[in-house]
Amino acid sequence: MSTIVHSLRDYRTPTKAQQFAQAFGLPDDEAPYVDAAGNRAEILSAILSLSTPDMDGAQEDLVFAGRLTLTPSFLCFASQGDRGRGCRIAIPLSTVRRVERLNTRDVVFALGITVWHGTHMIFQLNALRPSCEGFCNAMRVRLRAHLGEMKQLQPFLDSCYSEFLLKQSQDDVQEKGKGKEGTEADASEALKPYQMGLGATFGFPGDPKKLKEKSKMRLWKEYLRLHGRNITLLRYPQFTKLVQVGLPNMLRGEIWEVSSGSIFQRMAHPGLYESLLRDHEGKTNLSTEEIEKDLNRSLPEYAAYQSPEGIETLRRVLVAYSWKNRELGYCQAMNIVVAALLIYMSEEQCFWVLDTLCDRLLPGYYTQSMAGTLLDQKVFENLVQQTMPVLHEHFVKNDMQLSIVTLPWLLSLYINSMPMVFAFRIIDCFMAFGAQVLFQVGLAILKINGEAILSVTDDGTMIGLLRNYFRSLGDSAYPESMDERRRQITKFQQLLVIAFREFSVVTNDTIDHERKRFRQQIVQEIEAFARRSAIRNLHFHGRFTKPQLILIYDHVVESIYRARHAPESLTQGEHKVLSAADPTQDLKEMRVNFTTFRLFLSEIATWARDEYIVSNGFQERIERRVPDQTLARRIFDYWDKDKCGSLTLQDIVTGLDEIMFLDGDMAGATAWFFRLHANGKEKLSKNDILALSESLLFMFRNEPGDEHLGSISTLISRAFEMAGTSDA
C-alpha cells in the first residue's frame, strides 16, 4: 500500500496568491498586501526607469512598463508580457534604504527608491491619486514593520560570494598603487565568510580555459555592480543572456538560489538547517537507512564523493531534509541532484534549494510514486507528438518506449545523461526560467538526432545512439565547414540554440496546461498500479475473491483520504496517515490508524455510522456521521495482533475473513463476539459481560421495535447465571 494516491488527490490548482508568490520566487505566505480598509496595494500600470553607466561612462536609461505590487515583505515589479525574460524585480523591504517622492508634474506621481546595494529606481505610478496615496501609505506601514531587520542584513549578506567579489574589486582599485607582493599578502589574510560548495576544495568540473571562466566572471561582475546582487538583484534581458552563456563556477551556486527564490527562504529561516541536524543527531529512521545505501552511488566520478568529507556533506543535507519534510522523507534520484548541487553550494544553500525544488519547481518528482515525473513524461510524449509527428509515429509503429530514454533526463535534470559541465549549463537555465527548459532541451535532442532515430527499431539501439551523442557534445557541430567561426560552434551550443529558438513555443504556461490535462489520467494509472501491488503482496487472501479484495482495498484507500481531511473532533490529535515516508514511523508499508479504521468501518457496516436527513427547503440529502463508541476500538485492537497501534491491509483482510463468512452461523458469531470482549482471557468477567451488552445495544440501536432488547436481556441474564454458577 502507498500514500501516493492521496497526495495526488489532494492536488489543487494554485490560487492567484500562490501563483504570484511562485512567479517571483517568494515564500508561500507572501501575497499582495491588503490594508485595514480592504484596499490592495498594487499599481496595475507603472513605469520603471533606471539610469546605468555604459562602458564609456555615459548614462543609459532603461525603461520598463509593468505592474508594481507590494506584499507584506517585498516590493515586486514585472514588466508587461514578461515570461521570465523581461524585467522582474523582487526587493525585500528590509533592504530599502530610502524612499522619496519626486518633484514632477501634477499629473504624474513618481517615487524614487534606493536599496541596500545602492541601486536607484524610479517608479512612475499611472493611477488615480487616491490609489497612489494608498499605495504609498501601505508601503510606509510595511517599511516601518521591517525597519529592525536592516541591522541583521549584513551577517546574511556576508554569506554570499557576490559581496566578497565586489568588495574585492573595490579593494583592488584602492590597492592599485601597492606592489604585487603586498596585494597578495592582503588577499591571503582577508577573511572569507561566504558560503561555497565542494568545488572550492576539490575543484570544479571542466577546464576553466575552455569554459572561459575569466570572461564570464568579468561580465557578471559588471552586471552585479550595476544591477544589484544576491537579494537585491534586478533581472533584465541581459540577465537572460548571461545565464544562457553560462554561469562562472564561483557564482553559480548563488545565482541558482537567487533564480529559484530559495535565498529568501534561507534568509527567513536562519539557523534552521543546523538546528535540524542538532536536534536529530544520532537518531535513525527508514529514510536514513535508504540514504546510507545511496551515498556511495552519488556521482562517484567526482573527487569529493570519493572522500569522507564529501560523503558526510551529502549525508547531512539529505538527512536534514528528511527530517524537515517528514511525509516525503527521502527518495531515490534525490541523492544525484543534491550531490550535483553541493559542488557549487554550501550545505545550507543546497538544503533550501532542495526544499524549493521538491515543493515548487518540480513537485511530485522525488516521491515514492514519482508521480510528478510520470506526469511530465506524459506531457513530454504529447509534445513530441505535436512537434515531431513522424518521430512519434515511428515510436508507436516499432513499440519503442520513449520513457526508457527520457524519464532519466527529467528525473536527474540531465546530470546522469550527459557530461556534468553541460548538465550544469542546463540547470543554470532551469533555475532561471523554470521547467520549460527541461522540455525544450529534450525536444531539441530528439530533433537533432531524429534521422538517426528513424533508422533504429529498438530501445537499446536508441539508448546507445543518444549516449554517443551526449559524449560528443563538446565536439564541433560543423567540423567540415569552411568558416572557422562556424567550426567552433559545439554540438552543445547547437543544442541550446535549437531548444530556445525552435521550441520557444513550449512555455511554462504550456507545461501547466498539459499537466492539468493529463493529471487525472496519471492519478488513475498510479492508483491502479498501487492496487495491483497491494493485493499481490497479500500472503493470505482468506475466502475473498479478487474483486472482493479490490473492493476492500478501495474502501481502505477512500477512508485514508477522508481521514486526511477529518475534523479534529474525529482524529482526537491522532496522526492522520502513517506511512513509510514518515521518518517517525519505522514501517515498511502504509498502515491504517484508528481514525481511518473508524471511517472504514462506517463504510462497510451500517451499525458503525449514523445517518441523518439534511434538508435546506429545496433538496434533501443523507449525511453520515461516525459515532463515538468503544466497539470500534475493541475490533481495532483485536485485529492489531502486533500491538503497534495501526493495521495493515493484511490485518484488515484477515480480520474480515474471520467474521464475514459465518453465513448465519449464530454459534460462530457469538463465539467471535465473546472473544472480542475477552481481551485474550478464557472467560468473561462481569465487567466484560456488561461491556458486551453495551456493544450489542449499540449495534442494534437503529433497529425498529423492541425485540432485540429482549434477546439481549435474556443473553445477559444467562451469562450472569453461568458466571454465578462458575464462581460457586
Image: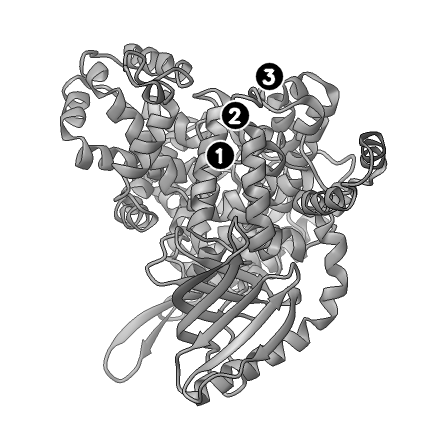
Q: Where on the picture, by quarter, is residue 173?
A: top right
Kindly report the distance in space between the C-alpha atoms of the residues bearing marks 3 and 1. Answer: 24 Å
Mark 3 / mark 1, whichever is N-terminal: 1
**In which quadrant will I find the N terminus?**
top left
Q: Front-most of 374 and 201? A: 201
Q: x, y (%) of residue 192?
A: 78, 40
Q: Is residue 475 depicted above or below 25 in this figure?
A: above
Left/right placement of residue 219 relative to residue 13 reads right
Q: Kindly identify the amino acid type of the residue bearing the numbered disc 1.
A: Gly
Instruction: State the residue at coordinates (58%, 49%).
Output: 224
Q: Front-most of 170 and 522? A: 170
Q: x, y (%) of residue 542?
A: 40, 30
Disc 3 or disc 1, which is closer to the eye?
1
The reply to whether the C-beta atoms of the residues labelled 2 and 3 are less than 8 Å apart is no
Query: Could you say which disc has been placed on residue 300 in the image?
Result: 3
> Label 2, on which residue?
211
Within-10-Å neighbours for mark 1: few <14, some 14–19, many 20+: many
Q: Which secondary structure, mark 3? A: loop
Within-10-Å neighbours for mark 2: few <14, some 14–19, many 20+: some
Q: Kindly identify the amino acid type of the residue bearing the numbered disc 2.
A: Leu
Within-10-Å neighbours for mark 3: few <14, some 14–19, many 20+: some
Q: Which secondary structure, mark 2? A: loop
The reply to whether the C-beta atoms of the residues labelled 1 and 2 are less than 8 Å apart is yes
Instruction: State the residue at coordinates (44%, 33%).
Output: 426
Q: Front-most of 212 and 521? A: 212
Left/right placement of residue 263 relative to residue 394 reads right
Q: Is residue 354 depicted above or below 390 in this figure?
A: below
> Label 1, on which residue?
246
